[in-house]
């Protein structure tokens, strides 16, 4: 009797640890969930133009712009620090042409509106000495503005030159982008967007939480007993088929809506899609806790995969699609998402199979993990609907 009580207390402690971990992770994820800057290199009228759009929220983390402490950063508060902002911007952005540094000069600062709020827009007309033909020059852009403060921050670079469009996702591991017209061939575009797709699924905490919530029950056999007493699967084949069904349904669904959005057949607003993705994470984890009464997970994967596809499409549109290689970019990004997803499955599934017999897997991974994901998803949903500041 005493041993059973001790086991129950241990399980409760483990569960509380997972729940607190979920709350802590949720707090961090909330702060980072939409931290992106938008960079553009364009060439109107044969003049090179560099533009950087940075969220006022990110600037406030560095410069403490909210002087009246009302929880809102205004354009007036931002303008009062213009000189410091210009210096900081030039220190974190470097442009080279043919290996030589370009002078950015004085930045023109303005406010601009994006779907998730107000941004500071800085625009330069770089002077690249010794470069006579920008069309054939190899350009290198380095972006280092916010990475030290926020390792989950990303810079989305869009290149829009006459006859040449490209995009790159910049991160702490990849702060530099090479811009060369030779990279505009369909095969190079395809390869580049494969990498972008892999990166997106790996840094998309909400997508990963949703996928793992659908897979966590695969190594267990459904039973009318409590979820924590479900027996371990004895044969690997049914488990593999279960996982294959979930992954295939998710892939098919998000490929459908990704294609529909990119071809402009269906374009729901991002302020509806992002909360819906967060809500799908909540429902997938709650479905695990229903135990024997849970819905078929491959069906959930398909239904909510349609929603996640819209989210993938929004990221792809932010990156910018080269008109000259639209099919290559779309195909490469979608393949990259699948490869990133497959890598997650290949890491998780062998570990789940090895641990499936243990109480640790049932109590901590399945039950505690699902509860933690519910908490995380609720926080995301509240934030993305504007109910949390």
Image (cartoon, grey):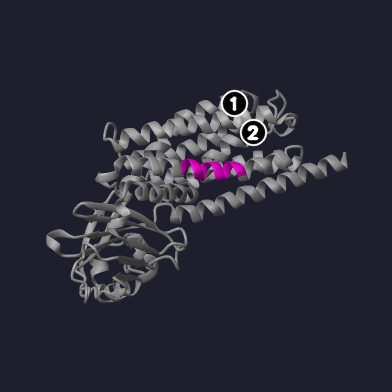
Is 338 magenta? The answer is yes
Q: Position of residue 339 (x, y in %)?
A: 50, 43
Task: Give the CA distance from mark 1 to mark 2.
Answer: 11 Å
Q: Position of residue 287 (x, y in %)?
A: 57, 31
State whether residue 230 is above or below residue 54: above
**For the residue labelled by badge 1, is the local secondary structure a helix, a strand or a loop?**
loop
Q: In the shown orientation, is residue 46 left or right of residue 243?
A: left
Q: Going by the picture, which residue comes out furthest to the left?
A: 45
In the image, the segment drawn in magenta is 337-346
Q: Majority secondary structure of the magenta segment?
A: helix
- Numbered badge on residue 217: 2
Is 60 magenta? The answer is no
Q: Which residue is mark 1?
A: 294
In this view, the mark in front (1 or 2): 2
Going from the N terminus, do you reach mark 1 or mark 2 first? 2
**For the residue labelled by badge 2, is the local secondary structure a helix, a strand or a loop?**
loop
State whether residue 244 is above or below residue 350: above
Residue at point 60%, 52% (across, down): 21
Residue at point 30%, 60% (across, down): 180
Q: Residues within 10 Å of mark 1 (few under 14, many from 20)?
A: few
Q: Nearer the viewer, residue 298 or 330?
A: 330
Residue at point 45%, 30% (across, down): 252
Residue 11 in sight from this viewpoint: yes
Q: Are marks 1 and 2 in contact (CB under 8 Å)?
A: yes
Of the 4 image quadrants, the one containing the N terminus is top right
């Amino acid at each position: 009797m005493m041993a059973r009580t001790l086991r129950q207390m241990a399980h409760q402690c483990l569960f509380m640890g997972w729940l607190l971990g979920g709350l802590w992770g949720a707090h961090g994820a909330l702060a980072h969930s939409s931290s992106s800057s938008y960079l553009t290199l364009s060439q109107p009228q044969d003049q090179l133009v560099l533009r950087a759009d940075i969220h006022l929220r990110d600037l406030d983390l560095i410069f403490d712009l909210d002087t009246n402490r009302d929880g809102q950063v205004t354009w007036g508060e931002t303008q009062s620090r213009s000189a410091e902002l210009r210096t900081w911007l030039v220190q974190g952005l470097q442009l080279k042409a043919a290996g030589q540094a370009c002078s950015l000069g004085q930045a023109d600062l303005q406010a601009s509106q994006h779907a998730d709020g107000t941004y500071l827009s800085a625009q330069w007309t770089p002077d690249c000495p010794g470069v006579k033909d920008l069309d054939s020059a190899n350009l290198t852009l380095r972006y280092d503005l916010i990475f030290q403060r926020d390792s989950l921050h990303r810079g989305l670079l869009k290149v829009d030159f006459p006859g040449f469009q490209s995009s790159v996702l910049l991160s702490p591991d990849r702060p530099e982008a090479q811009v060369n017209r030779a990279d505009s061939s369909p095969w190079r575009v395809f390869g580049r967007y494969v990498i972008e797709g892999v990166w997106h699924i790996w840094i998309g905490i909400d997508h990963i939480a949703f996928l793992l919530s659908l897979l966590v029950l695969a190594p267990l056999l459904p039973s009318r007993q409590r979820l924590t007493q479900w027996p371990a699967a004895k044969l690997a084949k049914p488990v593999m088929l279960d996982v294959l069904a979930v992954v295939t349904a998710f892939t098919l669904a998000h490929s459908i809506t990704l294609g529909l959005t990119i071809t402009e057949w269906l374009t729901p607003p991002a302020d509806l899609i992002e909360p819906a993705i967060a809500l799908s994470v909540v429902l997938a984890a709650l479905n695990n806790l229903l135990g024997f009464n849970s819905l078929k997970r491959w069906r959930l994967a398909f239904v909510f995969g349609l929603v996640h596809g819209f989210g993938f499409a929004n990221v792809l549109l932010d990156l910018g699609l080269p008109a000259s290689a639209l099919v290559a970019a779309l195909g490469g990004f979608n393949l990259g998402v699948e490869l990133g997803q497959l890598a997650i499955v290949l890491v998780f599934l062998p570990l789940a199979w090895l641990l499936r017999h243990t109480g640790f897997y049932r109590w901590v991974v399945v039950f505690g993990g699902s509860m933690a994901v519910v908490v995380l998803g609720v926080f995301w949903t509240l934030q993305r609907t504007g109910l949390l500041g």
